[in-house]
Image: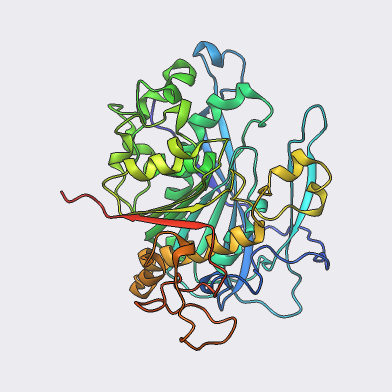
Amino acid sequence: MPLRARSIVLAASLASALIVPIAAPLAAQEAPSRFGVDAPELAGLGPASVGVRTLILIEHAQVDLSASGAQRGAAPRHDRVLKIDLWYPALTRPADLREVYRAAFPAEPPAPPVHFSVTGIAVRNAPAAGSGYPLVIVSHGHSNSPAAMTWITENLASKGYVVAAIRHEDPPLTDAAGLPELLLMRPLDIAFAAKTLQRLLAARRLVDPMRTALIGYSMGGYGVLTAAGATLDAAGRTVQLVPGGLLLPFASGGAMRDAITVPGLRAVVAISPAGGGELGAWGADGLRTLTAPLLLISGDQDRVVGYASGARGFFDAAVNADRYLLTFRGAGHSIGLNPAPAAMRHRLWDQDWFEDPVWSKQRINAISAHFITAFLDRHLKGDESRAAYLDVAVPESGDGVWPASTSSAYAAFSPGGPDVTVWKGFQRNHSAGLELLRAAARSP
């Protein structure tokens, strides 16, 4: 596969942004990036106001697997348009309207897609404040949208990160024939967006390109692990599913394997990551080439991508990376999106995009935001004080002890340490149902 020609069109530059009409916030809904009183310590919003704008990137001469002839290996090429939603620390005023995000997800066939809206805290096209921030690239799940991941995009931007979420142009989840396109384009999109934004935003001094992180949910988890350096298995089902050998150049032994890896990478977060099980994306050894610090987040009842062959298996296989595995006991696959918007609560199919059958989604997101914040602060900002939140005293959260003799306010956060082994940053009686495993990179 020839080296891809690349170019970019900025639909909204940092200096002059495209104005997109927005509606007033929905008073009955809280922004998903703002958590409740039971949230662990690092989940809360940071001190910065948040801006959001939309960029358009264009990749020239990309394979179009949806076109006629593609399944025979004669796929034509086209310009692939990627919209990027960019959140960043901003200068805002109290009177500024806050963003209302809008998207649509596929409904249970034969119903048409369901449209929904999400209240935000960001101000569209607000001027950026500050410079030299770490850059976080976010990749959503199959048929998802950045509008459904504002729980983490807005939250991180308020803490001094520039967060770029890709609107992947996925074939619909209801079309099984679209899987090959997804497997091919997801890591290519991530690598292209990351490299392009590193260059453009660094030129404007908004980001430090050598402090980059990747966050992916579900199929986005497959994408970020591959773009982080996990080696695709040339003989595996993932590569073989893509017609015409189009994924082979990026797999083990391929001439373009390095073309889909992201430079300046300091950390990777994969939530309910796909790529295990029957897909066998990286084979037995492909995850050994991961070296960036890794945080995996999963439910141990994930029946979509699997747990033993998914996040847990990836944790065991990525032996050359410092890594963590946060497990929600009893949770399933749907742990990466916002709480279900009102429009998605009328049918079970629609609600199941967002909600877990056991856990409160706001609780899941608050806990995940707490650990993602600690992880990124440590590895992208060099804040070693965050290690105490990650290197917990007991792996099972319910085994933590807070002696009755230790006086504190009812809602106090655990200070951690030898006496209080309730996980640091959690409130008394609010840390059950979790497991956090840690493994250091294998010595050379």
Q: Is residue 103 left or right of residue 257?
A: right
User: Foreground residue, 90 or 140?
Assistant: 140
Residue 441: x, y in percent? 25, 52
The answer to whether any part of residue 397 appears in the image is yes
Colour mapping used in the image:
rainbow
Residue at (43% x, 35% y) in the render: 309
Residue 71, above or below 371: above
Residue at (65% x, 70% y) in the render: 126
Residue 435: x, y in percent? 45, 56
Residue 222: x, y in percent? 47, 39
User: Foreground residue, 222 or 68?
Assistant: 222
The quarter holding residue 31 reads bottom right
The answer to whether any part of residue 205 appears in the image is no
Residue 301, above or below 385: above
Q: Is residue 351 left or right of residue 88?
A: right
Residue at (48% x, 30% y) in the render: 184
User: Foreground residue, 264 or 373?
Assistant: 373
User: Foreground residue, 393 or 404?
Assistant: 404
Residue 187: x, y in percent? 46, 38
Task: Classify the position of the N terminus by image quarter.
Answer: top left
